[in-house]
Each structure stands twice: as structure tokens, then as C-alpha cells.
């Protein structure tokens, strides 16, 4: 055996495969294979079904996460080639049949009415419209109409409350006055302006719950009110002359209701009083 000839041949082969031309060719070959696979992945129906099923599940999770007294609507853009099937805790995305689609799961909140066999065909919609009102979540091809009236958790808690019916209290309503006393104090201030309802609550237990139910009643009696907000107040962030100190300095639970309305009339004052009296009667 000629060892010298063998070693020479090995050296020539090694030199050939490590030549710049061969290395460039190998690099181009590997790059083409990678690009072909990436292109297949990017255009794969399986990939898109998986992606949108997961993303829709996360979208639903985020809607459940918002506090329940907030009504909201969202729009989700989904290619019309995909059909959707929603069930309790489960989303299925498919083209031809649910049996061949992709499934992903979301965290079903059982305080809400579950979605059962809700099938939305891609050809019937441009977007998916999600809406949450109270303890109901809806998904449809049509844009929903939301009510601004808040959803309040059902409760049967009773309180010893009394409305103040003196003329002096109503004469002072534009400066802010106490209209409900007892286990809970309610202050009301009525000002002229674009319709708006703001309810400030102290840090005591149950104040947000009662603020919610009073807000519901005010929506029913003041038709021009279309916006509201319920905000807890911390006294350490308030100046000494801030009207909200009327509730933070109280040892008892307290609310401050500030109502802006286009006109201030005796009729408006009367419907505010009626709404508060209805709350007192329900809590007795």
C-alpha cells in the first residue's frame, strides 16, 4: 500500500471541499433550504390557525380580566377564510370542518354566562365584535350597541339609612350637601355643564357596591347622563379644601356624587332625591 499517495489524495480532497467556491455553494444550498422551510411555515394554514386560535383565547382572557362594572366592546380582525367556534373555555378555528381545525383554551369565568356552540362563519363578517355587559359576553359579526349603565354584583345587604328631605339641603345642592345619613353618608353636588356623573367613594367596605347601585338608579332618572366613573379616594392625596374630604374625614362609609347636567331645575333635583330614596328603601 502506498501511504504517500494516499495522504496526497486526502490532502487534495480536503483542499477541494474547503475551497471558497465549494463553501459558497454549500452556504447557498443551506440558505435555500432554510428559506423554503420558512416560506412554508409562514404560508401554512396550520400555522395561521394555531396563531389566531391562541390570540383569540388571549383576547377573551383580557376581556374577562376587566372589572365587572365596566361595559366594553372590542373589535378583532380575523381573515375571512377562517370560521370560528366558541364553547365554554375553548376556541376552535377551522376552514372546512371543526374536526380538522385548531383548538386553544381560555380561562372561562363562571360568573359569566358561558359561550356554548357559538359558530361564526368567516364569509358572514369582516371583523369579530366582542362585547361585555354585566355578566354577559357576546361575540358576533355585527357591531354591538352598549349601554353605559353599569353592572352591579347582586347583593342583599341591608343598612340603616335615612334621606334628608329639608328644603335647606336641596337649596345647597349646588355647593354640595348631605342627602343620606345613617350607616352610610351620601353627599351630592349638582353643577351645570355637559352631562357627566362621578361618584367618589371612601375606602370603607361596601361603598363601591352601593355607589354602583345608586349610579344605576341615576341613569334611569337622568336620561341625558351617558358617562360615569366610580373612583375610590385616598385623603393623603387631597388638599385641605378639597370637597372630597367630606367623605375621607368621615368615620362611616361615605360617597360623594358630583352630577353635571345641562340645566339645574327643581325637577332634576327631585329625580335625584327619588333615586336616593329608592336606594334607601331597598337597603332597609
Image: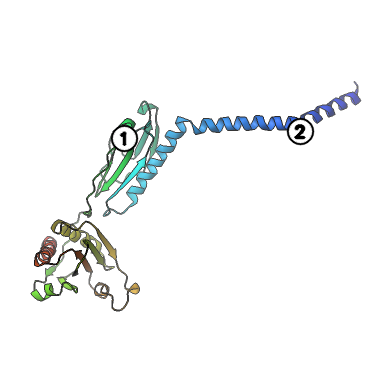
Mark 1, residues whose alpha carbon is within 10 Å: few (<14), some, or many (≥20)? some
Please tell me whether residue 216 is drawn above or below residue 112 in the rendered image.
Answer: below
Indicate the position of residue 104 as horizontal and vertical percent values.
Answer: 39, 37
Is residue 252 among what the camera can see?
Answer: yes
* Tag 1 residue: 125
Left or right placement of residue 152 versus residue 43 in this view: left
Residue sitting nearer the eye, 251 or 262: 262
Is residue 111 among what the camera can see?
Answer: no
Quarter holding the C terminus is: bottom left
Residue sitting nearer the eye, 159 or 114: 114
Please tell me whether residue 143 is drawn above or below residue 33 in the rendered image.
Answer: below
* Tag 2 residue: 20
Indicate the position of residue 175 as horizontal and vertical percent values.
Answer: 19, 74
**Cα gap from disc 2 to disc 1, whole angstroms:** 56 Å
Q: Secondary structure at mark 2?
A: helix
Q: Residue at x 17, y 73 (%)?
A: 177
- Asked which quadrant contains residue 226, the reply is bottom left
Q: Residue at x 30, y 54 (%)?
A: 67
* Of the image marks 2 and 1, the number of the one nearer the N terminus: 2
Quarter holding the N terminus is: top right
Residue sitting nearer the eye, 215 or 27: 27
Indicate the position of residue 39 as horizontal and vertical percent values.
Answer: 53, 32
Q: Residue at x 34, y 40 (%)?
A: 89
Amino acid at each position: 500500500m502506498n501511504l504517500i499517495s494516499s495522504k496526497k489524495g486526502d490532502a487534495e480532497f480536503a483542499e477541494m471541499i474547503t475551497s471558497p467556491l465549494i463553501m459558497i455553494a454549500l452556504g447557498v444550498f443551506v440558505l435555500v433550504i432554510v428559506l423554503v422551510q420558512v416560506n412554508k411555515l409562514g404560508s401554512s394554514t396550520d400555522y395561521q390557525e394555531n396563531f389566531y386560535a391562541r390570540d383569540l383565547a388571549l383576547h377573551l382572557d383580557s376581556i374577562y380580566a376587566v372589572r365587572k362594572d365596566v361595559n366594553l366592546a372590542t373589535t378583532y380582525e380575523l381573515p375571512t377564510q377562517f370560521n370560528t367556534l366558541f364553547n365554554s373555555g375553548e376556541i376552535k378555528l377551522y376552514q372546512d370542518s371543526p374536526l380538522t381545525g385548531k383548538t386553544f383554551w381560555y380561562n372561562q369565568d363562571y360568573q359569566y354566562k358561558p359561550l356554548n356552540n357559538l359558530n361564526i362563519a368567516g364569509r358572514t363578517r369582516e371583523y369579530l365584535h366582542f362585547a361585555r355587559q354585566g355578566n354577559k359576553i357576546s361575540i358576533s359579526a355585527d357591531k354591538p350597541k352598549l349601554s353605559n349603565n353599569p353592572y352591579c354584583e347582586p347583593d342583599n345587604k341591608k343598612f340603616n339609612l335615612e334621606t334628608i328631605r329639608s328644603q335647606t339641603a336641596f337649596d345647597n345642592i349646588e355647593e354640595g350637601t348631605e342627602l343620606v345619613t345613617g350607616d352610610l353618608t351620601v353627599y351630592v353636588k349638582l353643577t351645570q355643564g355637559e352631562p357627566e356623573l362621578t361618584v367618589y367613594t371612601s375606602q370603607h367596605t361596601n361603598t363601591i357596591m352601593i355607589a354602583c347601585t345608586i349610579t344605576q338608579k341615576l341613569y334611569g332618572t337622568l336620561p341625558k347622563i351617558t358617562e360615569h366613573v366610580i373612583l375610590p379616594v385616598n385623603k393623603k392625596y387631597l388638599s385641605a379644601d378639597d370637597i372630597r374630604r367630606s367623605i375621607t374625614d368621615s368615620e362611616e362609609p361615605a360617597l360623594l356624587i358630583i352630577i353635571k347636567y345641562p340645566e339645574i331645575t327643581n325637577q332634576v333635583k327631585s329625580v335625584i332625591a327619588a333615586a336616593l330614596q329608592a336606594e334607601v328603601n331597598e337597603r332597609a
